[in-house]
Image (cartoon, rainbow, N blue to C red):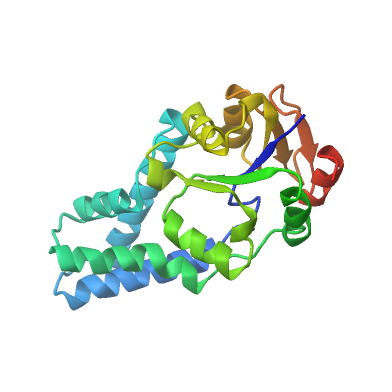
Amino acid sequence: MFKAVTFDFWNTLYKPPAVKEAGRQRINLFHNYLLSLGINVERREVKEGFLKAWDVAHKKQREEGLDITPKGHLHIILEHLKIKLTPEEEKKAYTIYTETLLDYPPVLNDDVKEVLPLLKARYKLAVICNTGITPGKNLRQLMKKDAILDFFDFLVFSDEVGFAKPSDRIFNFTLKNLGVENKQAAHVGDDILTDMWGAKNAGMTTVWLAPEGEEKFSYVDYHILRLGELTTILGV
């Protein structure tokens, strides 16, 4: 029945990052960098700019299925702060904004290392990820470091293609590149809107990874508590 399985990244392949710690450090580094340039802004203002950029980008993804890249985030922040940087200064600010997570690397979700080899032996595998602050190139680095990158035949990060879940465009794009019909693919994810509704709207089978989820949704075909349950659903 199935020929391919696609995975969400955050809260599916990887556990949530240390948001508070990384966020605090990101703000501090960014603020200190601006001060080093002689730009006197309050840390509070930097934090407000970060939150504004995240809110705008998050809403754009969920409501319009479009992506605002990390560079777009940076421009929102600089506009909020009413400052202009030289190209070289902006490059440094971008690095601070996007690479702080690498100092607080997330860890793989339970069962990932055990399940992926089993699925790879039978199915084509892909990642469909809505990126936020951290661009796809950095997430690839994490996957390579954790030795899971080679299990995947194709990876799609929203900052690289311009569209995002729940738009069916990103699911269709992925499956076209895998050479698989939508009805022959299952998508695994935790977000009930972007993953489940989005994948079902694209004609895929949906697998909701929700250890604490209790509600029933018409667009959820399977509800699992941990990734290890995929072996039963997918017959491996």
- Which residue occupies the foreground of this view, 121 or 222? 121
| Whether residue 233 is situated above or below residue 83 in the rendered picture | above
User: Is residue 228 found left or right of 188 in the rendered image?
Assistant: right
| Whether residue 38 is situated above or below residue 79 in the rendered picture | below
User: Is residue 188 found left or right of 66 in the rendered image?
Assistant: right
Residue 133 locus on image (x, y percent): 41, 55
Q: Is residue 125 in sight in this rendering? A: yes
Write the residue at 57% across / 38% down.
Answer: 178
Residue 79 locus on image (x, y percent): 20, 50
The image shows a total of numbered marks equal to 0
Q: Seen from this angle, which residue lies furthest bottom?
A: 36
Write the residue at 77% across / 29% down.
Answer: 1
Write the residue at 30% across / 61% down.
Answer: 46
Residue 85 locus on image (x, y percent): 14, 62
Residue 147 locus on image (x, y percent): 63, 67
Q: Report which quarter residue 128 is drawn in.
A: top right
Q: Is residue 134 in sight in this rendering? A: no
